[in-house]
Amino acid sequence: MALDLETREQLLETVRRFVRETCVPLEAKVAEEDRVPDDVIAQMRELGLFGLSIPVEYGGLGLTMEEEVLVAMELGHTSPAFRSVIGTNVGIGSQGVVMFGNDAQKREWLPRLASGEVVSSFCLTEPGAGSDAASLKTTAIRDGDDYVVNGTKRFITNANRAGMFTLMARSDPQRKGASGISAFIVPAGTPGIHVGKPEKKMGQQGAHISDVVFENARVPAHLRLGGEGEGFKVAMQVLDRGRLHISGVCVGVAERLIGEAVAYAREREQFGQKIGEFQLVQAMLADSKTEAYAARCMVLDAAKRRDAGESVTMEAACAKYFASEMVGRVADRAVQIFGGAGYVADYGIERFYRDVRIFRIYEGTSQVQQLVIARNLLKGD
Ligand code: COS
């Protein structure tokens, strides 16, 4: 159920203060040390951020999609690495359990995911299966009361901190495409699971991705999510939702960068006047504002439609496509307005420029979003 407007505003104000007072001053340190401090993570737990999307009966805040994207927009006002700490518990790591878990699975896992006691990760991507997720090769072969899992998952966010994986694996190796895939809850302590070292990345230092290798890892059959062969649909529906959340973060980052660019344009002088008085600079600010506003409207509309029970596969793809491309352009213009200072690390603008690049890639590339949009149009949805 939706929060009343006053409670909603209080929640957003609490997140806004946490972002501005705690996270923003730590941005450079987190990037340099490649880690979010434990006391900040503890504050996130206290604020309930790990459980934004988990139903109240399992200890979460049970936000609607609209409320969740509004929170995501607030979290976007700082380095995306902070959001990544809670991102998998709120989205792709937990939602398979929320949407497809049975009562016992929900009772066992959701309260601990909501509190942040357990971190979850989403194991879909493999070395040979990125955009073409249905070609994944990791197998989960039934053996008595267990499934035996073998394979390698790649670029798995938060795997190094995970206590639980939502895994997509091929339970029927005879079936090549989507229909042979099942989804599982896999406790991270299961023998036969090896998590690799975090990758060195272009941006978002403080957020970690690693390989997860399964070698004869035995997963009890009662931890399968949904029916045999339903795993691809689990993954797609989880991603439909996740794409809206990421779009909200893109809007937040864009608004932060517009704020920075406006402040700089008001203060920096060239040719005897503030650079904000030059129409060519004004044009850049106006383009950024227009696009960020359009993305905000799109994300909120799609989220409201989802809350009303509509299928929003196409709208979520439209929002993710537009918002992630939009924030790339906004970050580029912010660098341009800052000029040389935009290219220098001390100002932090170049860091955002690098950080936002992944938004056009993860949870489905822009090209995958285009494909989803066009397919839905052509099939008449
Ligand atoms: N909701 C529910 N079911 C869905 C769905 C959705 N959003 N999207 C697809 N499906 C179903 C289809 O209906 C189809 O089921 P049937 O065979 O019963 O009709 C099945 O899943 C296969 O769908 P499709 O034929 O569209 O699969 P494709 O292999 O062509 O792949 C794309 C579709 C490319 C859209 C998918 O692989 C994808 O999203 N790839 C990107 C993955 C991604 O985001 N990776 C990021 C890593 S996670 S951070």
Image: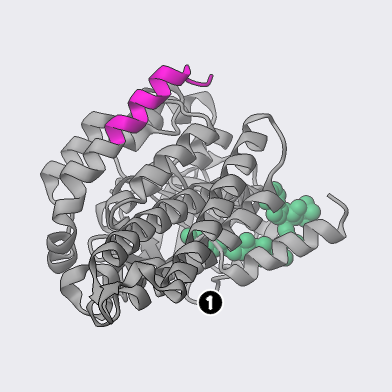
Helix, strand or loop at label 1? It is loop
Drawn side of residue 213 relative to residue 342, left or right: right
Q: Residue at x 46, y 72 (%)?
A: 279
Frontmost residue, 12 versus 211 = 12
Which residue is under mark 1? 128
> How many numbered callouts?
1
Q: Position of residue 238 (x, y in %)?
A: 56, 47
Asked whether residue 373 is in view, the answer is yes
Drawn side of residue 29 relative to residue 295, left or right: left
Q: Quadrant of ligand 1?
A: bottom right
Q: Main secondary structure of the magenta part?
A: helix
- What amino acid type is highlighted by mark number 1? Gly
Q: Residue furthest front?
A: 272
22 to 281, vertically: above or below: above
Which percent across, then down, holds residue 104? 47, 25
Q: Is mark 1 within 8 Å of ligand 1?
A: no
| Residue drawn where x is 50% and y is 68% of the image | 360
Residue at horizontal 25%, vertical 44%? 19
Specify start and end residues of the magenta stretch as a single range: 1-15
Residue 180 lies, in percent from the top left, at 67, 58
Choose top left, top right, bottom left or bottom right for residue 194: bottom left
Q: Residue 114: tell me if it is visible.
A: no
Q: Is residue 4 magenta?
A: yes
Is residue 66 highlighted in magenta?
A: no
- Measured as percent of width and height from the top left, residue 34 is found at 18, 65
Q: Between residue 216 and residue 133, name the one nearer to us.
A: 133
